[in-house]
Amino acid sequence: MTKSIELLRPAQIRTALAECSLIYLPLGTIEWHCEHLPVGLDALTAHGLCLRAAEVSGGLVWPALYYGTGGGHGAYPWTVMMDGPEHLEALLRKTFDRLADMKVERVVLLSGHFADAQLEMIDRLQAEAVASRPLTVRATAVNRFDIPGYPPDHAGRFETTLLAGLWPETVELDALPVRTDGDDTPDRHDPSHPLWGVIGADPRAAALPAGPALVGEFAAKLAVFATA
């Protein structure tokens, strides 16, 4: 049976949650990730990891929320970033309230977008829930899993390899221009730079065949986090 709650009938939801009363809630954005990656990367990554973790731990996966806040990329092409967390927090609080009404015991927020403002928001919601709700809320983000050899980045080796392990058909390294500049600075906010928007290692250093193993390692760690 699918783990995606939007595809399930009420009786299927009740059966799954009777076995493990856990909902994974993936968070992301619509955000520029250079020319080689889809703009939905953050949410696609979070949703894919949640689905795989749910296969290990049990529970179900909520539809991904394709909005986020922070990171300084709000003016990039094909990016919609909230100016602050207020509307996102209100939406998530309402979701927590309704899930608590329906006797869900635990919710795990996984953010594929890990700008500081986003991380502060999910940590605040976790702390708030501890004090005010009957359900447990745990919050984390993809940059908080220590995977040797894959330091977190934006559209670089880390995010490219991880997405390739989930949605390989969405990654097109050949879309990146040939580099003749010799500039390997990891901070590329200049629109004239051939890797504009890539913060971290050149994504062409990505070991794309390693993607499935990387996803498996992430999913196993997420499942442990969700049930600890």
Image (cartoon, rainbow, N blue to C red):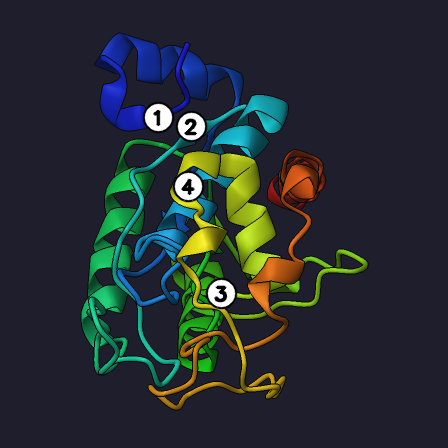
Q: Identify the residue position indicated by label 3 in the image.
A: 155
Mark closer to the chain start, 3 or 4: 4
Q: Secondary structure at mark 4?
A: helix
Q: Secondary structure at mark 2?
A: strand
- Tell me residue 108's x, y (percent): 48, 47
Mark closer to the chain start, 4 or 2: 4
Q: Quadrant of residue 181?
A: bottom right
Q: Residue at x 30, y 61 (%)?
A: 29
Horizontal side of residue 27 vs 11, given as left or right: right
Mark closer to the chain start, 4 or 1: 1
Q: Quadrant of the N terminus?
A: top left
* Kind of residue sitting beneath label 2: Leu
Q: Identify the residue position indicated by label 1 in the image.
A: 4
Q: Quadrant of residue 2?
A: top left
Q: Identify the residue position indicated by label 2 in the image.
A: 60
Q: Identify the residue position indicated by label 4 in the image.
A: 47
Contact check, label 3 and label 1, Cβ < 8 Å: no
* Kind of residue sitting beneath label 4: His
Contact check, label 2 and label 1, Cβ < 8 Å: yes
Of tags 3 and 1, the one toward the viewer is 3
